[in-house]
């Protein structure tokens, strides 16, 4: 069919009286032409945008960069292949260079001075909406006056006083985890400890943030646990697969792939958590005659309690509360689970370091297996060295995206034009031999007390998102407490070699083959350990 015939049909339609049946038949006959026109318009729009973005980069004198085809190939294949190809590219090309994320060119930087400059002077990239939309992220409140109040509220949930309230649950669940692992003790067969860490971490973060007992370690609420884990993986898939970018297409993908029920399960339980907490606090307020229904004897107990105090604001609804809580659970879970799993694997592979950590625990806490207190955490210096070195070697978030409205001068005098997207490569900094001389090896000496002042701002294990940094403080405490309870009871060993560690990008940078360990009892004469 020619363009002239399409135009002729269109003119006939314009002269006709409005009739729904006739209009429907005409549209049905023209659906092929309509789809073709929409597709052509979409392709031309992409081409125009790519040319516009390419013209911005002409003034940027950059180092050799991968071609558009090579960039696209980085996002082909499964998550394991994508991660391997991206890490290989970061080693082959020296920043700054340009990489194409589909139709968007991004300038990759990796110099420590450039990274600090960019993080101070730029805003978060608009590509973030593709990374965090799985739970309907907080974009809907980011442009109004309540946003800053919400951020301050989240920060107040991680003050020293609030952190102190999290310790009883952290101790309780860590002891429960250690007991749960006893069937694997003193056996010849290795097991994937990541499965246990994943469950207990989600239990801890959910109860500490909301007061709701999830009990996934006891195999309760498995639907929520499975849905939560699946959707976290899909969140990363969304930013490495082109078609689900727009919300409409992504929702269609959820429906066609049969994952819409998982999305609904997440929000069904989140509604239940908020409503249960509201009823509990209202009852408590009536019993104690509080003027504010959200008060308690000692003040707010959870992040959810703090957010509920903002509920009366017309810009902050119950839906916003659910989204904020789910976001913090998601970030806290990722940070803690990936950190503790990687640290356990590294300690199992480095027995000398493991014994030094164990002796430090005995020196500070003694042999009576008492509960861990806030004061104990600060004194675990060598343990923190091991944790920081693991996060340097295996950062949870290896990159971050930024945009800016003004030209930025890099350390080598190159100018990044205004309006360009920037990809901050933390992996390059963490493996910069000028900062970490033995960067290819796992070496806790990198974070020895005499080196801390020199490298304090040279490590970004959780990316550069302010909320990730908040959850990182909680993750560090949670990791230390779990390590204390596990190393008190067990010696760790592993047969995994460096060549067996392959990364995937789903929750973060995660070992695709799992975290396989063997456990042996530290004191077989102690009945408590039998």
Image (cartoon, rainbow, N blue to C red):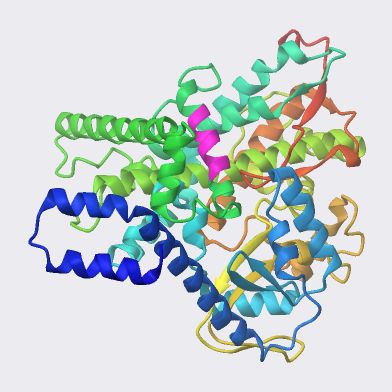
Quadrant for residue 58, please give it: bottom right
Q: Give the left or right position of residue 85, taking residue 126 as reference.
A: right
Who's the residue at 83% across and 37% down the image? Answer: 347
Residue 257 visible to an observer of this rendering: yes
Q: Give the magenta part as a residue range.
A: 226-234
Q: Residue at x 57, y 76 (%)?
A: 50
| Position above or below: 461 against 184 | below
Indicate the quadrant where residue 383 lies. top right
Q: How far from the left and from the top, in percent, is residue 360?
A: 79, 39
Secondary structure mainly formed by the magenta segment:
helix
Which is more toward the observer, 328 or 498?
498
> Residue 265 at x, y = what percent?
39, 30
Q: Is residue 394 visible?
A: no
Q: Give the mark count.
A: 0
Image quadrant holding the C terminus, namely top right
Q: In the image, what residue occupies the spot 53% across and 46% down?
A: 235
Specify the farthest residue to the left: 17
Looking at the picture, does residue 183 appear above or below residue 432? above
Q: Please tell me which residue lies in front, 524 or 479.
A: 479
Name the foreground residue: 140 vs 325.
140
Of the 4 image quadrants, the one containing the N terminus is bottom left
Q: Position of residue 330 (x, y in %)?
A: 50, 43
- Residue at (13, 68) in percent of width and height: 15
Q: Is residue 229 magenta?
A: yes
Q: What is the quadrant of residue 100 in the picture?
A: bottom right
Q: Is residue 324 left or right of residue 103?
A: left
Pick the front one: 465 or 489: 465
Residue 266 is a magenta residue:
no
């Amino acid at each position: 069919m020619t363009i002239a015939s399409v135009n002729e049909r269109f003119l006939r339609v314009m002269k006709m009286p409005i009739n729904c049946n006739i209009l429907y038949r005409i549209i049905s006959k023209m659906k092929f032409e309509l789809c073709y026109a929409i597709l052509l318009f979409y392709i031309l729009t992409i081409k125009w945008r790519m040319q516009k973005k390419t013209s911005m980069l002409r003034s940027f004198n950059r180092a050799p960069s991968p071609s558009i085809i090579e960039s696209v190939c980085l996002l082909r294949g499964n998550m394991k292949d994508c991660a391997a190809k991206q890490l290989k590219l970061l080693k082959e090309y020296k920043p700054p260079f340009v990489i194409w994320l589909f139709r968007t060119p991004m300038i990759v930087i990796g110099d420590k001075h450039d990274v600090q400059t960019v993080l101070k002077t730029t805003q978060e990239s608009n590509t973030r909406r593709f990374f965090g939309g799985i739970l309907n992220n907080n974009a809907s409140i980011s442009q109004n006056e309540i946003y800053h109040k919400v951020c301050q509220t989240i920060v107040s949930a991680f003050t020293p006083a609030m952190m102190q309230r999290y310790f009883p649950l952290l101790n309780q669940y860590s002891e429960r985890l250690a007991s749960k692992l006893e069937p694997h003790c003193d056996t010849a067969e290795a097991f994937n400890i990541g499965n246990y860490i994943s469950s207990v971490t989600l239990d801890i973060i959910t109860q500490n943030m909301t007061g709701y007992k999830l009990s996934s370690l006891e195999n309760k609420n498995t639907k929520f646990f499975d849905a939560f884990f699946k959707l976290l993986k899909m969140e990363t898939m969304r930013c490495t697969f082109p078609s689900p970018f727009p919300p409409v297409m992504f929702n269609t993908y959820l429906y066609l792939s049969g994952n819409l029920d998982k999305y609904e399960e997440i929000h069904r339980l989140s509604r239940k958590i908020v409503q249960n907490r509201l009823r509990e606090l209202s009852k408590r307020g009536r019993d104690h005659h509080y003027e504010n229904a959200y008060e308690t004897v000692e003040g707010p107990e959870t992040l959810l309690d703090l957010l509920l105090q903002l509920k009366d604001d017309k810009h902050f609804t119950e839906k916003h509360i659910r989204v904020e809580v789910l976001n913090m659970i998601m970030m806290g879970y990722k940070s803690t689970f990936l950190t503790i799993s990687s640290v356990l694997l590294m300690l199992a592979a480095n027995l000398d370091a493991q014994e030094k950590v164990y002796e430090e625990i005995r020196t500070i806490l003694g042999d009576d297996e008492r509960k861990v207190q806030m004061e104990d955490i600060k004194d675990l210096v060598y343990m923190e060295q091991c944790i920081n070195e693991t996060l340097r070697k295996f950062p949870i978030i290896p990159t971050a995206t930024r945009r800016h409205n003004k030209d930025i001068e890099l350390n080598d005098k190159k100018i990044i034009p205004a309006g360009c997207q920037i990809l901050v490569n933390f992996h390059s900094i963490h493996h910069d031999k000028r900062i970490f001389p033995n960067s290819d090896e796992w070496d806790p000496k990198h974070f020895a007390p005499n080196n801390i002042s020199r490298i304090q701002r040279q490590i970004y294990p959780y990316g550069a998102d302010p909320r990730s940094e908040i959850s990182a403080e909680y993750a560090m405490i949670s990791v230390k407490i779990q390590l204390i309870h596990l190393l008190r009871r067990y010696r760790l060993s592993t047969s995994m070699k460096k060549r067996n560690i392959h990364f995937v990008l789903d929750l973060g940078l995660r070992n695709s083959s799992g975290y396989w360990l063997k456990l042996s009892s530290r004191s077989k004469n102690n009945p408590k350990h039998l």
